Amino acid sequence: MSGPVHQWFGLTYSAYLVLPRSLLEGMPEPWQAKFVALLEEMAETYEPIADVYHVRLRGERGKFIDDPLSNYRRPSPLPYRSGRKPEGAL
């Protein structure tokens, strides 16, 4: 395989991309609209697959740790990089 997504994953062995809902909802609304449009287009294009996954966060030493972004209803402050909070973001 090749292409932008393949290049984005780089040399990792990752088979999935997991994104916290609180970060997605923290994006500016124009970004959210683009993201959702692409998800909908993908859903219309591919046959549905089993979508029951369970995700747990592991720390640097491989032990499971509490995910600070798991409470999407009352998220902790989002971890923006210094000077990188986009206009319109939460």
Image: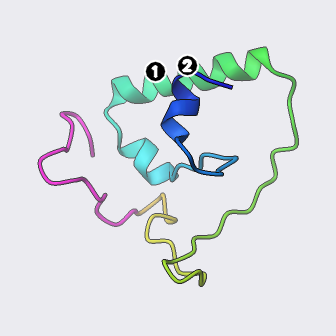
Which segment is the magenta one? 75-90
Give the vertical position of 57 relative to 78 (above or below).
Answer: below
The span from disc 2 to disc 1 (Cα, nearest Å) is 5 Å
Residue position marked by numbered label 1 in the rendering: 34
- Does residue 23 appear left or right of residue 5 in this picture? left
On the rendered image, what quadrant is the N terminus found in? top right
Image x and y of residue 90, in percent: 27, 46
The structure residue drawn at horizontal position 55% and vertical position 29%, both measured from the top left corner, is 5
Identify the colour scheme used: rainbow
In the displayed structure, 34 sits above or below 61; it is above
Evaluate if marks 2 and 1 touch, with contact meaning CB atoms under 8 Å apart.
yes
Q: Is residue 1 above or below residue 57?
A: above
Q: Horizontal and vertical percent for residue 6?
A: 58, 31
Q: Quadrant of residue 78?
A: bottom left
Q: Residue at x 50, y 72 (%)?
A: 67
- The answer to which of 72 and 43 lies nearer the viewer is 43
Would residue 83 be found to the left or right of residue 68 on screen? left
Report crowding for label 2: few under 14, some 14 to 19, many 20 or more residues within 10 A (C-alpha): few
Task: Decide: is 3 above or below 70.
Answer: above
Is 76 within the magenta?
yes
- Under mark 2, the amino acid is Ala
Taking the spot 42% from the left edge, 43% from the top edge, the residue there is 25
- Magenta stretch secondary structure, dominant: loop
Q: Amino acid at mark 1?
A: Lys
Q: Identify the mark at residue 37; answer none if there is no mark.
A: 2
Secondary structure beneath label 2: helix
Q: Is residue 25 left or right of residue 50?
A: left
Along the line of sight, the residue nearer the viewer: 79 or 7: 7
Other-residue count near label 1 (Cα within 10 Å), few / some / many at <14 / 14–19 / ≥20:
few
> Residue at 26% of width from left, 40% of height from top?
89
